[in-house]
């Protein structure tokens, strides 16, 4: 694709006769929906309103917007007039928002009214923001409301853009620290649709998409916005927390054909359906998991309940979506599958030499959807983006048939008795115990200063383990005597990013 991405994802559908087809439908609450024709018109008016407000081409627009109709209207409106939308995690703190706003130097901020109390103190400390638009009930604040912003806006002629021009930014989820501004090109979105969405998911116009993962990060943006728009399908938007109860109701009532989640939520759904026998009857033809590696046991239980597999895949903010995945006709639970068509992958050691079968190496990936850089972080950009390859920071082992098995983040790996230990392997063994819902494993030094595994576990509702030594023996029998956790702490929950990635660095420092 060359040109402005808004032409292909939005306006094209009007010319192809889909004006009345539903693009997005809000589930629960308002029940609002928007057709492709209305999306094309509203996004053009949003572009016009931006221009009339004095926001210039290249300026950044900060989106503190929940999963609601205004998100795609604003996003594509920005692209149409050359403004750069910055989709921001709606679950962060004021301090992090302050950092992101000042880092991006945003000129305008769109804020869902539910987030005002957290976001406004950060905006007050960001002098670059000259306009704030509030989405939702606007009775209790002095800022411009969304209807007021859009009032009188005319249609806008979409600006021409080259495919490799900067289109939008995302901020990395921060599984290892401070979020970084990741800059993506116009053509990157279509690249993910032509590779993973088309060749692995085989999406088409009749599909109904539901992503528990939100639009503000790369995985959710593909699932809930660009993938359905690539084929003229319908996406269900849910602006609240995806609890097992809420997701079960959405699956039951709205009957999506494609469901996208994260391992934690899949595990919670399986537990709920097992405990209260509430497994819904859903016409799912495909389910996807990303964010963390999917425990094999969860995949097998889901298949038994829903008669559809979960495709475990690997993506990143830097690559925009999934580039390594299992496939419907080529799936092995406990692995991350193989490279998605259109991507190349390598496993390398600390000397950048490719490792052999059965050895552990860092995963590098090459593909057209790669980000351009990290905003204002040249050293980190140089470390991550090298000669067309993107370093993921993930450690993998390759099997003899070419599949990759996740071992952990580079920072999470450690050696016990001189042998590499994969935290994820130990976590999978722990999670396969009937009483354990999820687990995280980190390195911890014993009295002699030697590194050994330490586990944090969350138990299933109503379950208990009387003797944790029994759990240690269970792991020994599963994966080997040197890998078992020497210490086990039972906790209420594990620290995670909004994408569902466990923040092991927080456990290491606890």
Image (cartoon, rainbow, N blue to C red):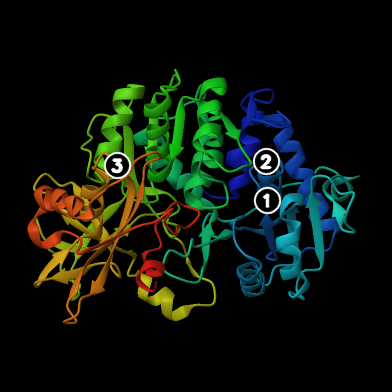
Viewer-closest of 492 and 502: 492
Q: Nearer the viewer, mark 3 or mark 1?
A: 3
From mark 3 to mark 2, how far is it between C-alphas? 37 Å
Tag 1 secondary structure: loop
In the image, taking residue 467 as reference, residue 19 lies left or right, namely right
Q: Residue 237 at what x, y percent from top left?
A: 61, 36
Q: Tell me if 98 is positioned left or right of 442 in this view.
A: right
Q: Earlier in the sequence, mark 3 or mark 2?
A: 2
How many numbered circles does the render carry?
A: 3
Frontmost of labels 3 and 2 is 3
Q: Which mark is residue 195?
A: none
Question: Which label sits on residue 65?
Answer: 1
Q: Are marks 1 and 2 in contact (CB under 8 Å)?
A: yes
Image spot of residue 156 (x, y percent) = 78, 46
Q: Where does the image place residue 67, in percent across and percent down from the top left?
A: 63, 43
> Mark 2 highlights which residue?
68
Residue at position x 11%, y 44% in the image: 401
Q: Which residue is mark 3?
A: 435
Quarter placement of the C terminus: bottom left
Q: Earlier in the sequence, mark 3 or mark 1?
A: 1
Q: Could you classify mark 3 by the number of other residues whose Cα lies within 10 Å: few (under 14), some (14-19), or many (20 or more)?
A: some
Pointer 2 local density, CA inside 10 Å: few below 14, some 14–19, many at least 20 = many
Identify the residue at image location x=46%, y=79%. Answer: 378
Q: Is residue 247 visible?
A: yes
| Helix, strand or loop status at disc 2 | loop
């Amino acid at each position: 694709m060359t040109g402005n991405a808004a032409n292909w994802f939005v306006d094209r559908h009007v010319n192809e006769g889909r004006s009345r087809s539903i693009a997005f439908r809000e589930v629960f609450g308002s029940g609002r929906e928007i057709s492709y024709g209305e999306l094309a018109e509203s996004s053009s008016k949003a572009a016009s309103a931006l221009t009339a407000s004095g926001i210039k081409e290249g300026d950044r627009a900060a989106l503190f917007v929940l999963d609601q109709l205004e998100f795609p209207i604003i996003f594509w409106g920005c692209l149409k007039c050359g403004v750069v939308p910055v989709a921001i995690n709606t679950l962060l703190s004021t301090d992090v928002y302050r950092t992101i706003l000042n880092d991006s130097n945003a000129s305008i901020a769109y804020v869902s009214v539910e987030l005002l109390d957290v976001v406004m103190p950060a905006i007050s400390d960001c002098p670059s923001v000259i306009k704030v638009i509030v989405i939702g009930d606007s009775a209790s604040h002095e800022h411009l409301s969304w209807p007021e912003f859009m009032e009188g806006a005319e249609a806008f002629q979409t600006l021409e853009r080259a495919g490799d021009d900067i289109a939008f930014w995302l901020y990395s989820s921060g599984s290892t620290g401070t979020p970084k501004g990741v800059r993506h090109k116009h053509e990157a979105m279509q690249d993910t649709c032509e590779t993973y969405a088309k060749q692995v998911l085989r999406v088409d116009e009749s599909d109904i998409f539901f992503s528990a993962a939100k639009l503000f990060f790369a995985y959710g943006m593909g699932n809930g916005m660009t993938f359905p728009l690539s084929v003229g399908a319908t996406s269900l938007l849910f602006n609240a927390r995806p609890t097992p109860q809420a997701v079960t109701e959405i699956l039951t009532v709205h009957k999506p054909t494609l469901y996208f989640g994260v391992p934690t939520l899949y595990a919670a759904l399986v537990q709920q359906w097992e405990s209260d026998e509430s497994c819904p009857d859903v016409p799912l033809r495909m389910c996807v998991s990303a964010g963390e590696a999917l425990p094999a046991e969860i995949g097998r239980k889901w298949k038994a309940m829903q008669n559809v597999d979960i495709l475990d895949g690997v993506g990143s903010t830097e690559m925009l979506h999934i580039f390594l995945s299992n496939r419907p006709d080529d799936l092995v639970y406990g692995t991350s599958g193989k490279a998605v068509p259109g991507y190349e992958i390598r496993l390398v050691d600390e000397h950048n030499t490719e490792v052999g079968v059965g050895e552990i190496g860092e995963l590098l990936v090459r593909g057209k959807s790669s980000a351009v850089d990290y905003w204002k972080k040249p050293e980190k950009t140089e470390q991550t983006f090298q000669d067309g390859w993107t370093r993921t920071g993930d450690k993998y082992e390759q099997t003899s048939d070419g599949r990759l098995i996740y071992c952990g983040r580079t920072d999470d790996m450690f050696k016990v008795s001189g042998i590499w230990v994969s935290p994820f392997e130990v976590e999978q063994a722990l999670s396969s115990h009937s009483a354990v819902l999820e687990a995280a494993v980190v390195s911890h030094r014993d009295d002699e200063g030697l590194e050994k595994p330490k586990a944090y576990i969350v138990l299933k509702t109503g379950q208990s383990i009387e003797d944790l030594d029994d759990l240690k023996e269970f792991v020994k029998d599963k994966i080997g005597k040197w890998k078992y956790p020497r210490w086990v702490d039972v906790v209420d929950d594990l620290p995670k990013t909004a994408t569902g990635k466990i923040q092991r660095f927080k456990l290491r420092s606890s």
